[in-house]
Image (cartoon, rainbow, N blue to C red):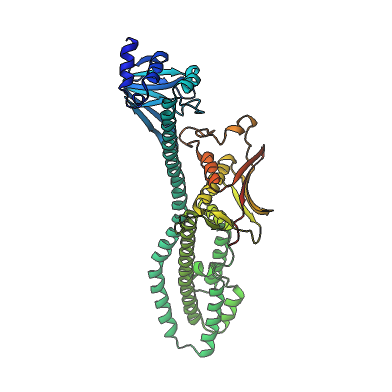
Amino acid sequence: MSAKSLLQRLSEHRTVGAVPPQEITWVAEHGVLRHFDSGSVLTSKDTQVEGLHIVLTGHLTIHVDGGTGRRKVMEWHGGDVTGLMPYSRLVAPPGNVIAEEPTEVVTVYRKDMPEMIRECQQLTAILVHVMVDRARHFTSSYLHDEKLVSLGKLAAGLAHELNNPASAIVRSAGAIPSSVSKAASASRALGSLGLTEERIAAVERVRATCLTGVAPVILSPLEQQDREDAICRWLEKRGLDLSTAEALAETNVTFEIMEQLAASMDREAFNASLRWIAADCVINRLTSEIQEAASRISHLVAAIKGFTEMDRSSFPEPIDIRQGLANTLTVLRAKAKGKSASMSMDVEEALPAVNGFGGELNQVWANLIDNALDAVQSGGRIELKANRERDVVVVRVIDNGSGIPAEIRDRIFDPFFTTKPVGEGTGLGLDIVRRLLQRHNAQIELDSIPGRTEFRVILPIAEAR
């Protein structure tokens, strides 16, 4: 193709054609027309971008492997420009740039870019705007992607945490009808005996002992079985109903107390009394389990609500670091349990508030703690510390993992850089942390040696109002 016909095509280009003719001429003289078949790679991932690419015809796309799988993040058609832009620090794309159909581009190579900036000022201005829009698109796309990954992790953890108390409620509620029926039957049997006031008071004392001692000590399954077997032997020796053994074994009732009650009445009355006491204790234990499980669910919902800062305004306000850290630990507890990792929190008393957005700071804590959990081995340890140092609040996230190698420490905050396997990370967690902290006029620092990695977040204290 002649230079003249290329000049004509560039003049009709949607992006480049708006600049003065002499600038279009410069591009036609210095650019190289290139043809790509469908499926060809314009620029490979982690390969240096050759230069500015002006798309004349065809269709280019870039796909990136991230935490939500392989996805298209951007595309270009005839009339668009891509590749290296003026003043851009772009070195390599995060994924392969592929021609989806036969495509023609004019490439201004990297070595000619400084001259283009000098000679083509209006084109440079246009390309800078394109670069800003591209950066905004990538940032928005990957922030969304990272948030989906985080949401997925938190949803899975929350579902796991909610499942246990919810199952406990279903299990206990399902057992209540039969327990109430047994209690009613035992009450009728006991009432028909016409016990004296003195004997009824003795039964009530044993019942009170059982109720105040419901599950006071957590026994191992073997210890619990041993206690139940011992009560069974005691009941069998006296010819009493063995069905009460399981319920009595879960209380603090002692053989001494039962001996005292047995001595005050005949066997029939004593047997009816134990049935009534056991049935009543079972009902109280079931209701206690339901109350405890419901309280646990309420606590989890409050924690996730606090973590997301659902009710907060869109303006900066004083933020309680302690509460944010506590909520974050709660929503990540399931992952810590999965790795048998311990998490501790040590926050200075009367820690001053910082000014900012609670939900965004909680996202910072979540990313740092989540990374720490990924870094430690099974049985590892995560420590959270927060204290005041002069006019700032310092939050430390410390893990006892293998550490971050010195050769990659300068890159860990770079977009798309990750040491995790494909599909397990977007490489944007720490980039998001850095961006969110910039909004809070905060800083983040790192120290790492094998066995101890510490991220320090330094936040200015909120001004008194």
Answer whether residue 241 is visible to the viewer in this image. Answer: no
Query: In the image, what residue occupies the spot 40% across and 26% down?
Result: 82
Up/down of 412 relative to 80, above or below: below
Is the C terminus in the top left, top right, bottom left or bottom right quadrant? Answer: bottom right
Residue 302, image x and y in percent?
48, 60
The answer to whether 389 appears left or right of 343 in the picture is right
Up/down of 403 relative to 44, above or below: below
Residue 6, image x and y in percent?
33, 15
Q: Could you say which is closer to the camera, residue 451 or residue 198?
A: 451
Q: Could you say which is closer to the camera, residue 214 or residue 418?
A: 418
Residue projecting furthest to the bottom: 197
Up/down of 103 relative to 282, above or below: above
Q: Could you say which is closer to the camera, residue 378 or residue 172?
A: 378
**Occupied quadrant, residue 152:** top left
The answer to whether 42 appears left or right of 258 in the picture is left
- Looking at the rendered structure, the number of numbered marks drawn on it comes to 0
**Occupied quadrant, residue 126:** top left
Residue projecting furthest to the top: 2
Residue 423, image x and y in percent?
45, 35
Query: In the image, what residue occupies the spot 63% across and 41% down?
Result: 445
Is the N terminus in the top left, top right, bottom left or bottom right quadrant? Answer: top left
Answer whether residue 263 is visible to the viewer in this image. Answer: yes
Up/down of 48 relative to 402, above or below: above
Q: Could you say which is closer to the camera, residue 419 or residue 205?
A: 419
Query: In the image, what residue occupies the spot 46% across and 45% down?
Result: 150
Residue 140, image x and y in percent?
42, 40
